[in-house]
Image (tube, grey):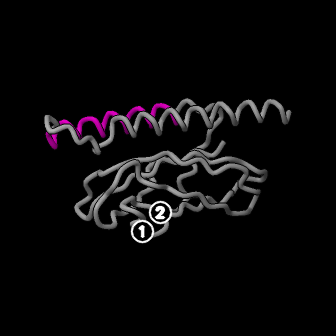
Amino acid sequence: MRTARGALRARHALIATAAAVLIAAGGTGCSDTDETPESLASKASEAIASATAKLSDIQGGINAKGDVKAGPTENKDGRAVSEITATNSAGSTTDYTIQVNFKDSDGNLLDAVVVTISDVPAGGSKTGEARSNRDLSGTPKAEITRAVRH
């Protein structure tokens, strides 16, 4: 059983990594001068859709958005950083894969990341760090968009 769980974790880590790469590649941080705000927003939307699809691929995953909270956002070396806390409401140790969006004060999407917090004990909490893919000015708000317990 433990070997199967290890294989499942490896698959989930691969999915989370792929989603993060998709978001980073399609994020709004492109410095190409041919890009318009509309095309950057479109790319960000496509990346979010891809991440959502990847999260949906997690077999046996349960919606656990209520188990996850984002802390205040800080600016560290130009990147937006927020501590994400997963509190396991299940009866056994489990993993969480979480999509975190960074938004400005007007609610505009600036960036998105996928965070995995592994081995959260039953009834316990564990933290992970959501760090923007690119430099963001100010201190945007971190928002939990989706969380899957698996």
| Image mark count | 2
Looking at marks 2 and 1 on the same chain, the residue that comes earlier in the sequence is marked by 1
Question: For the residue marked with disc 1, what is the amino acid?
Answer: Glu
Q: At 67% across and 47% down in the image, what residue appears?
A: 95
Dot 2 falls on a residue whose secondary structure is strand
Above or below, 70 relative to 20: below
Looking at the rendering, the stretch of residues picked out in magenta corresponds to 36-55
Q: Magenta stretch mostly in which secondary structure?
A: helix
Question: For the residue marked with disc 2, what is the amino acid?
Answer: Ser
Alpha carbon distance from label 2 to label 1: 6 Å
Q: At 43% across and 50% down in the image, what residue appears?
A: 145
Give the quadrant of residue 35: top left
Q: At 37% across and 35% down in the image, what residue appears?
A: 25
Confirm or deny contact between disc 2 and disc 1 (CB under 8 A): yes
Furthest residue to the right? 1
Furthest residue to the front? 77
Above or below, 78 relative to 113: below
| Relative image position of residue 120 (x, y in whole percent) | 71, 55
Residue tagged by mark 1?
74
Instruction: Name the mark on residue 82.
Output: 2
